Amino acid sequence: MKAFTRRKFLYSTLLGGLASPWLGRGPAIAQEAAAGIYEGVSGDEIVLGTSAAFSGPSRGLGIELYRGAQAWFAQVNEQGGIRGRRITLKLYDDGYQPVPSVQNTMELLLRDQVFALFGYVGTPTVTRVLPILKKFQEENVYMFFPFTGAQPQREPPYGEFAFNLRASYREETAGLVENFLGIGRRRIAVFYQADAYGRSGWAGVREALGAHGEQIVGEATYSRGAQFSGAMREQVEILGRANPDAVICIGAYGACAAFLRDAIDLGLEVPIANLSFVGSENLLQLITDSVGNSERYSRYLVNSQVVPSYEDESIPVVREYGELMQRYNPKVPEPLFQPDYVPFEKSFVSLEGFVNARIMAEILDRLGDSPTRSRLEEAVFSVSDFDLGIGEPVSFSEQRRQGMQGLYYTVVDQGRFVPLDDWQSRFG
Amino acid sequence: MNMNVQKLFRRPLFGIFLLFGIIAVSTSWVCIATVDSQLSEEYESNSRGIAQTIADASVDIILNRDLSALQSLIDQFLEIQGISYIYIVNEEGEFLAHTFVPGIPEVILASDPANTESVERQLSGADSYVEVGSPILAGVAGTVHIGMDKSVITLKIQQAVGRQMYLISSIFLVGIIAAILLMNLAAKPVENLLAYAVELARAEQEGESVKSALLERDDEAGQLARLFLYFSRVADPEKTGTGAYPKPS
């Protein structure tokens, strides 16, 4: 373990003071830091810190992402850990709200002294946390594989403090726009969450349409935290007036399911696309559980994904994921456990968490027997053309801080998400 | 405690009511005008400051970064009390970021996106807003607009006027009770004098004499009592010249 130097102590004290407006106990944290817990690594443990939505209308995202990651980490730990150190996730719930995510991050960095941040959920949360990483840049604090495809953690001034594995929203929206335009659906409207996430997707659609000389024909928004029980009729009416050929939704499952329901009920029967963040299974479950004929609604759905179908067991990583999810069936630990939430056996979100954990473990292994934060970046950049078994090599470099670019489109068939191969026959 | 008001004092009491009413209305009006003016100026000034801050911070984001960063920026300012909406348009009037739900209101879509003057807007239903603007990079990169909810100002005016009215009403109530008590105190000798005069008239008819403490008083009531007695004696020749009572001075 690295010695706790005087500079480190002074810095910890200063950071404790900085944190006091949020936590009200900065000096105490600095004292705890001074007690010798350093960089989240001990002789037998590496601690990663997570702030995600484990409660509220988007809890399914945080829970499923954690379950997928934990399925892989559980196996790693069972087999002796990373060079003798088991991987532990320190979890905090932010309810998909920015202010708690900032508080949690300060807690993770100052009190828990985690090795790295891992598995954060959401754009509005992550964008608020990024400046903290810059503040801690001398400590080499990095964020790994947040569950968001937004740009702020992919470009200056904060891009150098985060590593992404999944494709970006810009790529997802561009893919959707290309496919819609390809089948002659040129009038595209956007339904989005009124925050940084929604804006990121909106900007992606705008840019992709702009490249073809088109514009967004209509837009409607909803407030973050909106639930399926709420009405989206106003939004449907606003978009309906624009007479769109397709709608791209940038939201979470509760609001997007409500929009789909109200759109079809009000006669807006056009393809309704969602991004990977939506939480496809949660969305479909809301629709299926609430309406008599879910096929009437789900046949308009098309969701983009950043991981392949979890049903396709010809893909090695999918097969491995299925086995480990069944073997460990991870549960969110107390006190974050939500007894009324029934997790999915498999989902796109948990598969993404699984893939994230696989690469994270690989990076930790490449740090050698004495892992330090200062060598993290070097370890990440050493991952080049790594075969994850997903059909796409994973690579990182100074210029490439996003490991994969793969996009997959899915539609609902007989109550399950299946790959969409032919846009023309489905939506043409 | 006798709270009946003598007929003699009903008009003065009405005058006091009227006076208090005028004071209450005039001070409330002055208060409303002052609070309204000062709060409106303060809110507008603060909003202009915030708009300027966002405009300054937006330059780099608009030119170099993703619009989600711009949205994240304005979302933070929306947490300030009184600010109801923020939107940013580029130099061509295209909306780059905004906080409207479920959509951008028609009245704003139809407005001049480059305007930075203060304007009043009626958006959803009866809600009224004051909007200020600030140019980004002297307007060549767009404009920031901030809408303040006027109901916040109205609520503060109502609170200030309410507190003042509460104070004035309390003073009014205490003043009226005090006025009635003082008037009754002042009316007591008149009541006694009236009773003495009636008793004197009765006694004169029955040939009796009347004694009263009023005759011993050295104020106006005592003088009037002695005057009544004098006149009763003047009216009765048998009693004149007895010298029992002095002639009124």
Image (tube, coloured by chain):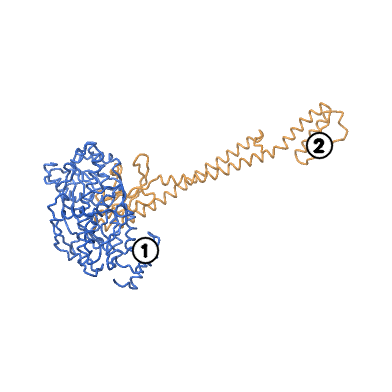
Chain colours: A blue, B orange
Q: What residue type is labelled 1?
A: Leu
The label on residue B248 is 2
Give the chain of mark 2.
B
Other residues around mark 1 within 10 Å, as few (<14) / some (14–19) / many (≥20) = some
Secondary structure beneath disc 1? helix
Other residues around mark 2 within 10 Å, as few (<14) / some (14–19) / many (≥20) = few
Q: Which of A402 and A87 is in front in this view?
A: A87
The label on residue A352 is none
Is residue B63 in view from this perspective?
Answer: no
Q: Nearer the viewer, residue A247 or B197?
A: A247
Q: Distance between the residues labelled 2 and 1?
A: 94 Å
Point out the residue furthest to the right here: B242
Q: Is residue A247 left or right of residue A34?
A: left
Q: Is residue A296 above or below residue A58?
A: above
Dividing the image into 4 quarters, which one contains the C terminus of chain A?
Answer: top left
Q: Where is residue A29 in the image (x, y as percent from the top left)?
A: 37, 64
Q: Position of residue A109 (x, y in %)?
A: 32, 63
Q: Position of residue A69 (x, y in %)?
A: 23, 56
Instruction: Confirm or deny contact between disc 2 and disc 1 (CB under 8 A).
Output: no
Give the chain of mark 1.
A
Q: Report the residue marked by disc 1.
A: A18
Point out the residue furthest to the top here: B205
Dividing the image into 4 quarters, which one contains the N terminus of chain A?
Answer: bottom left
Q: Where is residue A170 in the image (x, y as percent from the top left)?
A: 20, 53
Q: Which amino acid does label 2 sit on?
A: Pro
Discs 2 and 1 share one subunit: no
